[in-house]
Amino acid sequence: MATEPLPNAALIAALATVKRSYEWARVRRSVLLAAAMVGLAAGVAQLAGSASAWWPFMVAGVLLAGVEFRGQAAMKGARRGYLAGLALLAAPLALLRPCCIGMDTAADVMRANCCTMPSMCAGVGVAIGVALSLARPRSGSRVEGAFGLWLGVASIASMRCTGLFVGEAVGLLGGLLSGIVVSSAAQAAFTRAKTAG
């Protein structure tokens, strides 16, 4: 029985070099794209008066670079989530705290401790999570796409959370996660029932 000749050492080394170059190119592309996405988000946050701390931008950069490097359904979901996060970042604080309508400055809003509204933040988060889940890409793993979606929106929404109180931030991020999970599970159950019937 004839056997295939084993590749020589030079060919193995050349293949390893090509693979290493390819992976480094993917890393560079992911980091540059994530940096551009975070830069745009920082600009939106600055214009909207939502930026108050630097660490969420660093966290968002690492998360977005990781999901861009991963690719596939997670990357597609994260990109959609990123766009929704930008919209949330640009939204007025009165969306999350309707009781603050009429207050002149962000300092007035932050001093109004009686105005915290975690339930409103959670409601907005659920609504955005459900809308995102319904609009997510149909190709690829459903779980991976939903995770990418949440990761994309949460990485940008966390920048908005630095201007909120802890309960409101937890409500917003938890609402986003709940909306995506519940809507994705309902879609999966509907798809299974449709194919079974």
Image (cartoon, grey):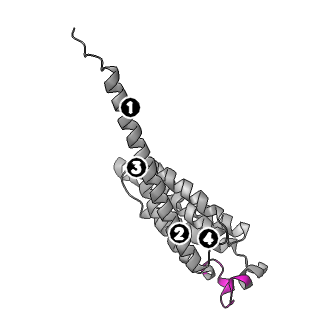
Residue at 30%, 17% in the rendered image: 6
Q: Residue 73, image x and y in percent?
A: 41, 51
Label 2, residues with CA under 10 Å away: few <14, some 14-19, many ≥20? many
Q: Residue 116, image x and y in percent?
A: 73, 76
**Location of residue 43 with respect to 181 vertically, above or below:** below
**Disc with the residue nearer the chain's start (3 vs 2):** 2
* Residue where numbered disc 2 is placed: 41
133 or 79, nearer to the observer: 79
Q: Is residue 100 visible?
A: yes
The magenta stretch spans residue 105: yes
- Marks 4 and 3 sit apart, C-alpha to C-alpha, by 27 Å
Question: Label 4 sits on what residue type?
Answer: Arg
In this rendering, the label closer to the viewer, 1 or 2: 1
In this rendering, the label closer to the viewer, 1 or 4: 1
Q: Residue 63, image x and y in percent?
A: 55, 54
**Location of residue 47 with respect to 186 vertically, above or below:** below
**Which circle marks residue 16 in the picture?**
1
* Residue where numbered disc 4 is placed: 160
- Marks 2 and 4 sit apart, C-alpha to C-alpha, by 10 Å
- Using residue 8 as the reference point, say whether residue 65 is left or right of it: right
Question: Label 2 sits on what residue type?
Answer: Ala
Question: Label 3 sits on what residue type?
Answer: Gln
The secondary structure type at the circle numbered 4 is helix
**Disc with the residue nearer the chain's start (1 vs 2):** 1
- Magenta segment boundaries in residue numbering: 95-107
* Residue where numbered disc 3 is placed: 72
Question: Label 1 sits on what residue type?
Answer: Ala
User: Are dots 1 and 4 in contact, CB under 8 Å?
Assistant: no
The secondary structure type at the circle numbered 2 is helix
**Disc with the residue nearer the chain's start (1 vs 4):** 1
